Amino acid sequence: MYNQDNNQSYQYYNPTFNNQEYDQKTNNLAYGTSVLREKSIPITLTWNVNAWAKIKRSLKETIQGRFCAGEDDEEFEEYKQLLTNVCGIAKPGSLCAIMGASGAGKTTLLNILNFRNIGKLETEADIKINGVPVDWDMITRYSGFVQQDDLFNGVLTVREHLTFVTMLKLGSSYTREERYQRVDEIIQEVNLIKAEDTIIGMGDKMKGLSGGEKRRLAYASEIINNPPLLFCDEPTSGLDSSMAQSLVESMRRLADSGKTVICTIHQPSSQTFEMFDSLVILAEGRLAYLGPNNQAPNYFERIGYPVPRLYNPADHYIQSLAVSPQDRENDLLRVRGITDQFEKSDLYAKMMYDIQLNDSQPMNLEDDDTPKYNTGYRSQFGWLLWRQIKLDLKNPLATKVVLIQTIVVSVFLGLIFLRLEKNEIGVQNRTGSLFIIIMQCNFGFLFGVVNTFPTDLILVYRESKNQLYSITPYYLVKQVAEFPKYVIFPAILITICYWMSGLNDNFGVFVQILFTLILCTQVAVSYGLFISALAPNLEAALAMVVPIMMPLLIFAGFFLNDVGVPDYFIWLKYISWFFYTNEICNVYLWRDVKNIPCTKKKNNDTCGAFGCFESGQEFLDANGFKEKMLPLDFVVLILLFFAFRILAYIILRIKLSRS
Ligand SMILES: Nc1ncnc2c1ncn2[C@@H]1O[C@H](COP(=O)(O)OP(=O)(O)OP(=O)(O)O)[C@@H](O)[C@H]1O
């Protein structure tokens, strides 16, 4: 067993760091920006993690050792262990590298340590900060996490993105000038001066920053508020060796100023590798090594895998633990041997002792009263609105496309129903034209929401999870920013269609119908928000939107009179906003219209929306539209407008708390 007398302080992990030097270093760093010089609470992170994934397997695959699909094949579920007793400790002032072959479990470990992206994994995790068990809230408060995949608003520039993040991440203890100064410092720190006014870009759709610049921007966004604990998942991937070196140097400076930095890394150069002072090596979800970087060569030599002369040690460790498809069985046995040996080693015993020692002396973290967000709701709302306006102004193409589309469709509809006559054909065409305008107001603008909102939500979930802002101000900004759009565009559509087809020459009627149809469009937009929040992704949202809306449209009660639709479908019209909109618009359109002669019928019949009827009958009644129902129709539309939006908000909150 490990001898306690051999225990040293955490210089064991970072020989250059100790408490006495801490103040001096943080106050007087000869290099780096003030971000890196700022003091923060020293953090020791300990963990012990197990993780399983439920996977579906075929019976034949299990029996024969290979997949062989067939009619009598059966599938069953089993748990695959991804991480097995992966323990570890990272101390303040240390730069710790997590390494391992592809699929070793590095990202899974980092995600579990951060309580992120766990999805359906079953986990058993004992994670502590300075001896205190942590939850997602606490780890987010004390740490930054540079995730493997970069997610940004592509139309913003580097400076705009960093300004937004800085304003929200730095609390009110910083003046506005200090925050702007921080943006300058951070751009300098990550060497993005050349690209500061370049747009970030969106894959192939919009060319912007290079992959390496995006990685540096992701790193910059996380260190901007000087977190005492930093996780980075492959921050150097996509960077050339000199950029990778410069990024690791930046992490080294963070560690030297007393922060705890944990980073997964693939194929570091020998120079870069030397900057790490502790090493976690994973193989097949188990620990193959955890200890000081400079002791790793000795350890691997002792267990029979000496680092060859003039060889990059990092490459050697990964290759010693690699499993090749050609000789999988033997390689797995070799890897198992190495991981078993580590669990019996002195280093392992020392690590366990360190963990126990740390956990037995929990520190009092000034925690509970700390607000969840660094800025208040008002400030979050302001900066989110600032970003939203920038996004809208910088992406005029989207607005232009909708505008052109709206004008083209309106003129087309107007031409179809051009200057309708005042006879029974004209009456029926007016009703038909109105119905098509209602449909266009719904389908045309609904897809604008469903096509964009689910994609926006991916970034919003991540930023909210990072406690950059709460979902509440985001959602309010979304409403405020989108509202004018879905007033102006339907207004253009309705105005063109209405006057081209000459629905009713009375301007008052036009205003009433305009208002009603804008309200209907807003209900459709609410429905779009609801479906987008409910659906797991864009494809699902698009697939759900029409099948749910179609029955509401079909059974809205417009043509049920003679079709013989079963009664139990009729109730659908009472939750259909098409039905209420149609009733209101028709009442406005027809209530002052009297005695349009019915040319095809005798007896001075009057024509209506669904054919001729006997003169003397009330026009609206004969067509099935009830003026006295107008207040109720409006109430239902307004209720649906709010109900969908509130439901969408509730779903977003639930999803966020579960993600
Ligand atoms: N949700 C999941 N369901 C099933 N298997 C999973 C799940 N998540 C991860 N795995 C598996 O767990 C293993 C470890 O994955 P992980 O992404 O942590 O590897 P990694 O070491 O980060 O690899 P890389 O360096 O390629 O990013 C892989 O074999 C992966 O297929």
Image (cartoon, helix red, strand yellow):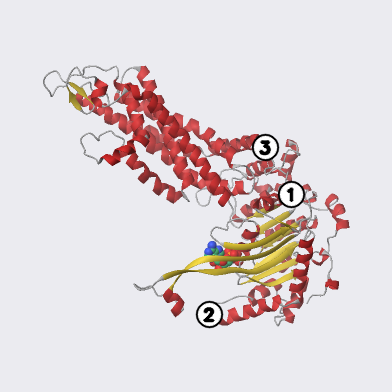
Query: Residue 93 at x, y = what percent?
Result: 79, 59
Nearer the camera: disc 3 or disc 2: 3
Front residue of 2/602: it is: 2
In this rendering, does residue 207 appear at all?
Answer: no
At label 2, which amino acid type do we have? Gln
Residue holding disc 1: 226
Distance from the alpha carbon under mark 2 to that under mark 1: 46 Å
Whether disc 2's CB lies below 8 Å from ligand 1 is answered no
Query: Residue 414 at x, y = what percent?
Result: 31, 29
Q: Residue furthest front?
A: 568
Q: Residues within 10 Å of mark 1 (few under 14, many from 20)?
A: many
At label 3, which amino acid type do we have? Gly
Label disc, if present, on residue 458 of the rendered structure: none
Lower sequence index among marks 2 and 1: 1
Q: Residues within 10 Å of mark 3 (few under 14, many from 20)?
A: some
Lower sequence index among marks 3 and 1: 1
Give the residue at x 57% y 66%: 52
97 horizontally vs 511: left or right: right
| Quadrant housing residue 316 | bottom right
Front residue of 291/550: it is: 550
38 horizontally vs 612: left or right: right
Whether disc 3's CB lies below 8 Å from ligand 1 is answered no
- Name the secondary structure under disc 1: loop
Viewport quadrant of the N terminus: bottom right
Give the residue at x 76% y 77%: 298
Front residue of 430/37: it is: 430
Distance from the alpha carbon under mark 3 to that under mark 2: 57 Å
| Relative to 296, residue 143 above or below | above
Query: Residue 658 at x, y = what percent?
Result: 56, 51
Residue holding disc 3: 376
Label disc, if present, on residue 326 of the rendered structure: 2
